[in-house]
């Protein structure tokens, strides 16, 4: 008897496309009761997760909250809804069902749907050191599952179903997904002895809005931040401050990421800008005065870099000078052809042309001489638009309480170094310190 091949998650996701809109399933009375029992235990076990489910993941306007469908293995999510296959989901016992629903919720807290789409579009997975690995949908889905399953197990949220992807040598709770991806990828390249090359797992991470045709509707990051904070409060109330360490770290990492802002920007530069080469025949002028022969940079990884210093009074002189000094070392790595520093609040007060990235260490907050007014980045973008040359990188230091343009300017890399938790409407937002 021939073996029937197990379909991959990618094949299942393809099969699902366009099917959900036509499929209308109703739960049986018994299944409906089982679903209510699942939600009741979630209230008792993890009230914060149940809060997130009903606040943010019930967009199908159905009577259950979930979307019943036979097109998924056991469960799935698309950042809009949680989908379950009634035939398989309700074969599980109560605690296993809580584990599965919690698993789908955490996919959304981590933003896995959006990250998967981003990797699929680029065809690569960015590593923390700036390198990339080829993207494989099946591999990434497994990597995401490994870290979520470890978190739920350690936090005692439900019970892991039989055969679930769990291995502490592959992923522990709260580990970065790209680090896990690298381990799964390397294991698969060596035959998949640990991770199982064709293990489809119990769920699917779908494209955004696949369940109800809202693929063009991005999720609201501010709304998610507010509700995740509320979920953390509910969990703390339930545990009276004695919650499981993995779950506490999970909320802390989401709400208060501890990655240094310089590492964020360095990663962006490594992935998007690149770097120049070295010339040993031409010594670095910064070291030659100390009789140290170090190679100078040759070639350019970037063209024109424009930095904006918000002089509205929200960033102190000492703070901004410190940030610029730290930025100098990062910019130096990409060896730009030109660096411009613009001081502006609601108008431009001074423009400094920087000869070397290291000179950012000594630059002064010149804009405070005329600053202190409102804040707008429009004068800066208007000044850039008046030039025939387009900068390759724009970095803005601001508190985010800014009059942003309606549309992003045509600059390849835009980074906002925020002193608050404001998220810019375009570009990459990097928090450099928490709110006062």
Image (spheres, rainbow, N blue to C red):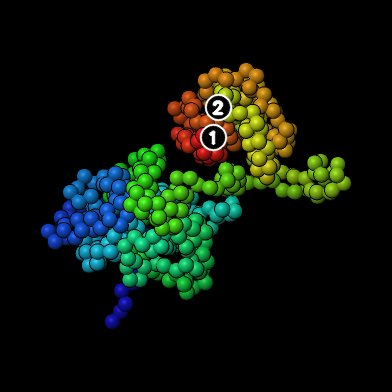
Rendering coords of residue 70 (x, y %): 23, 60
129 displayed left or right of 110: right
| Dot label at residue 67 | none
Rendering coords of residue 238 (x, y %): 33, 52
Disc 2, SS: loop
Residue at 25% in and 58% down: 41
325 displayed left or right of 227: right
* Residue 129 shows in this picture: yes
170 displayed left or right of 325: left
Which residue corresponds to mark 2? 314
In the rendered image, the vertical position of residue 223 relative to residue 254, given as above or below: above
Residue at 21% in and 61% down: 86
* Farthest left residue in view: 29
* Residue 107 shows in this picture: no
Which residue corresponds to mark 1? 419
In the rendered image, the vertical position of residue 315 relative to residue 330, given as above or below: above
Rendering coords of residue 88 (x, y %): 24, 65
Rendering coords of residue 278 (x, y %): 75, 48
* Farthest bottom residue in view: 1
* Farthest right residue in view: 291
Earlier-in-chain disc, 2 versus 1:
2
Disc 1, SS: loop
Which quarter of the figure is the N terminus placed in?
bottom left
249 displayed left or right of 261: left
Residue at 60% in and 20% down: 371
Residue at 15% in and 55% down: 26
In the rendered image, the vertical position of residue 244 relative to residue 349, given as above or below: below
The 10 Å Cα crowd at callout 1, few under 14, some 14 to 19, many 20 or more, is many
Quarter of the view holding residue 198: bottom left
Instruction: Give the alpha-carbon distance from disc 2 to disc 1, as whole Å.
Output: 9 Å
Quarter of the view holding residue 94: bottom left
Q: Are marks 2 and 1 in contact (CB under 8 Å)?
A: yes
């Amino acid at each position: 008897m021939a073996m029937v091949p197990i379909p991959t998650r990618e094949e299942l996701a393809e099969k699902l496309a366009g099917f959900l809109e036509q499929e209308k399933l109703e739960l049986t009375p018994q299944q409906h009761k089982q679903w209510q029992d699942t939600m009741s235990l979630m209230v008792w076990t993890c009230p914060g997760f149940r809060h997130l489910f009903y606040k943010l993941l019930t967009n199908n306007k159905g009577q259950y909250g979930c979307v019943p469908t036979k097109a998924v293995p056991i469960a799935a999510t698309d950042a809009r809804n949680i989908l379950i296959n009634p035939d398989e989901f309700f074969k599980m016992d109560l605690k296993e069902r809580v584990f599965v629903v919690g698993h789908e919720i955490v996919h959304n807290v981590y933003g896995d749907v959006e990250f998967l789409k981003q990797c699929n579009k680029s065809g690569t997975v960015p590593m923390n050191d700036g390198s990339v690995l080829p993207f494989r949908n099946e591999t990434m889905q497994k990597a995401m599952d490994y870290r979520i399953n470890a978190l739920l197990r350690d936090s005692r949220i439900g019970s892991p179903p039989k055969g679930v992807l769990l291995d502490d040598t592959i992923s522990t709770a709260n580990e970065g997904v790209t680090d896990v991806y690298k381990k799964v990828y390397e294991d698969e390249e060596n035959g998949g002895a640990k991770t199982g090359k064709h293990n489809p797992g119990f769920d699917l991470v779908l494209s955004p809005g696949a369940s109800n045709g809202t693929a063009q509707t991005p999720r609201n990051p501010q709304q998610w931040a507010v509700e995740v904070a509320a979920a953390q409060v509910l969990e703390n109330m339930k545990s009276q401050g004695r919650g499981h360490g993995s779950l506490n770290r999970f909320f802390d990492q989401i709400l208060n990421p501890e990655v240094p802002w310089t590492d964020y920007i360095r990663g962006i530069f490594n992935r998007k800008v690149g770097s120049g080469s070295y010339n040993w025949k031409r010594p670095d002028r910064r070291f030659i005065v100390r009789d140290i022969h170090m190679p100078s940079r040759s070639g350019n990884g970037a063209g024109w870099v424009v930095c904006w210093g918000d002089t509205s009074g929200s960033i102190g002189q000492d703070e901004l000078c410190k940030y610029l000094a730290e930025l100098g070392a990062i910019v130096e790595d990409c060896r730009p052809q030109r660096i411009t520093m613009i001081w502006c609040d609601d108008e431009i007060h001074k423009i400094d042309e920087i000869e070397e990235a290291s000179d950012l260490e000594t630059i002064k907050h010149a804009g405070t001489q005329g600053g202190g007014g409102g804040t707008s980045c429009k004068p800066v973008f208007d000044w850039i638009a008046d030039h025939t040359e387009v900068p390759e990188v724009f970095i803005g230091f601001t508190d985010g309480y800014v009059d942003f343009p309606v549309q992003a300017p045509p600059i390849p890399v835009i980074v906002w170094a925020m002193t608050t938790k404001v998220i810019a409407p375009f570009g990459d937002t990097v928090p450099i310190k928490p709110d006062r």
